[in-house]
Image: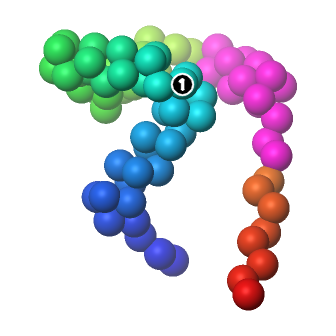
Amino acid sequence: MSYLNSVEIMDKGMKCLLDAMGAVETEKFISAVLREKFNYTEWRKNYFDDMSPKEFNEQAAYYAKINPFVPLKKQVKI
């Protein structure tokens, strides 16, 4: 198993944000997180704590339906 260092994680996260939202929305997101002193871990904990197992399952199934898993093509090293 390979672990990413902090720079690799930041690069990967930025790519995800840029691919999903574009440059302007990514910048707005980062600005909001910094401005609000946002604690993602606490936010997610509170979000899931208020959710029943049935509701969690329903939301997960819905997410999977509208975001089907598409594996990346394997890269061929030359």
Q: Is residue 42 magenta?
A: no
Q: How many marks?
A: 1
Question: Is residue 28 among what the camera can see?
Answer: yes
The quadrant the C terminus occupies is bottom right
For the point 20% across and 22% down, which residue is it?
34
75 above or below 29?
A: below
Name the residue nearer the viewer: 31 or 49: 31
For the point 59% across and 34% down, which residue is it?
19
Seen in the image, is 53 located left or right of residue 27? right
Image location (x, y in percent) of residue 25: 46, 17
Residue farthest to the bottom, as pictured: 78
Image location (x, y in percent) of residue 18: 51, 33
Query: Residue 24 appears in which quarter of the rendering?
Result: top left
Amino acid at circle 1: Gly
Q: Secondary structure at mark 1?
A: helix
Seen in the image, is 3 located left or right of residue 77? left
Image location (x, y in percent) of residue 46: 35, 18
43 above or below 77?
A: above
For the point 44% across and 12% down, which residue is it?
50
Seen in the image, is 13 located left or right of residue 7? right
Crowd rating for badge 1 (residues with CA inside 10 Å; few <14, some 14–19, many 20+): few
Bounds of the magenta segment: 55-70
Q: Which residue is mark 1?
A: 22
74 above or below 47?
A: below
Q: Main secondary structure of the magenta part?
A: helix
Name the residue nearer the viewer: 51 or 27: 27
For the point 31% across and 58% down, which residue is it?
7
Seen in the image, is 43 located left or right of residue 14? left
Name the residue nearer the viewer: 24 or 13: 24
Name the residue nearer the viewer: 8 or 37: 8
Question: Is residue 57 among what the camera can see?
Answer: no
